Amino acid sequence: MFNFRIQHELTCVAEGDGQFFARAGAMVAFQGSFKQEKVLFDTNANSSMLRSVMNYASRKLSGENIPIMKVNGKGTYYMAHFADHVSIITLNQGQSIGVEGENLLAFTPDCKYGVKFVGVGVISQKGLFTSKLTSIGPNAQVAITSNGNPIVLETPCVVDPDAVICWTGQDPSVRTDLNWKTFIGQTSGESYFLEFSSHGEIVIVQPSERPSGLKLSVD
């Protein structure tokens, strides 16, 4: 069994033996014996071939199909992504987390990996879907990246959809602040928000915004 830890804020270190899953190309070094292979369809060991193909198709069509590799071996394995800040989230049994695919770095086999519909695609570059990881065992860990030190908020809260990285619990609703000024370029630049209304859940955002998928101002 592998366990994840953070080293120098920019690196996820997997220590132990067995297997885990990581973003393709995430390895920067290792000590021990490891083998990496690309995951063709599905990371979920108990899925049927039909279910595996459907999961692959949903990731492909939704744009959440980041290249994933299965890592087998024993020792210490170091992962990073363009010097982004790395955070590790431990999930309780049955708990799920929504993660933007571009921010997913690695996860243990006790996480069921799939895609879920969010429905705010025109608001942000991130699209209509997000990756979903659900704990199906006692060692469910997810490593995520952020452009800069992450901001961890407890719900309820409101966040910019272009800065959100991941969240636990109920999916957000969309709030808008549109009026006639928006369409003549007299806008604050903050016309859309994601509102998390449940209590006691976690939302993580980064101090950097993705390019917006919708431009409403007029030059």
Image (cartoon, grey):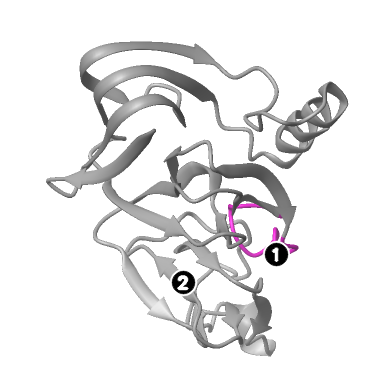
Residue 119 falls within the magenta-colored stretch = yes
134 to the left or right of 109: right
Q: Vertical placement of 46 versus 138: above or below? A: above
Total labels drawn: 2
Instruction: Using a 10 Å C-alpha cutoff, classify the residue at mark 1 as few (fewer than 14 neighbours), some (14 to 19) or many (20 or more).
Output: some
Which residue does the numbered mark 1 point to in the structure image? 120
Q: Amino acid at mark 1?
A: Val
Disc 1 + disc 2, Cβ < 8 Å: no
Residue 15 falls within the magenta-colored stretch = no
**Outermost residue toward the right in this view:** 50
Which residue is located at x 39 percent, y 33 percent?
1
First to last magenta residue range: 118-128
Q: Amino acid at mark 2?
A: Val
40 to the left or right of 200: right
Q: At which x and y percent is residue 150?
A: 30, 63
Q: At which x and y percent is residue 113?
A: 63, 42
Q: Quadrant of the C terminus?
A: bottom right
Residue 115 visible in the displayed image: yes
Label 1, label 2: how far apart the Cα atoms are: 17 Å
Which residue does the numbered mark 2 point to in the structure image? 203
Which residue is located at x 76 percent, y 34 percent?
55
Which residue is located at x 66 percent, y 28 percent?
45
Q: Vertical placement of 80 versus 210: above or below? A: above
Which residue is located at x 51 percent, y 83 percent?
158
Where on the picture, by quarter, is residue 83?
top left
SS assignment for the magenta stretch, majority:
loop
If you read the primary sequence from the N terminus, does the residue marked by circle 1 or circle 2 appear first? 1
Residue 192 visible in the displayed image: no
Mark 1, secondary structure of its residue: loop
Q: Nearer the viewer, residue 93 or 65?
A: 93
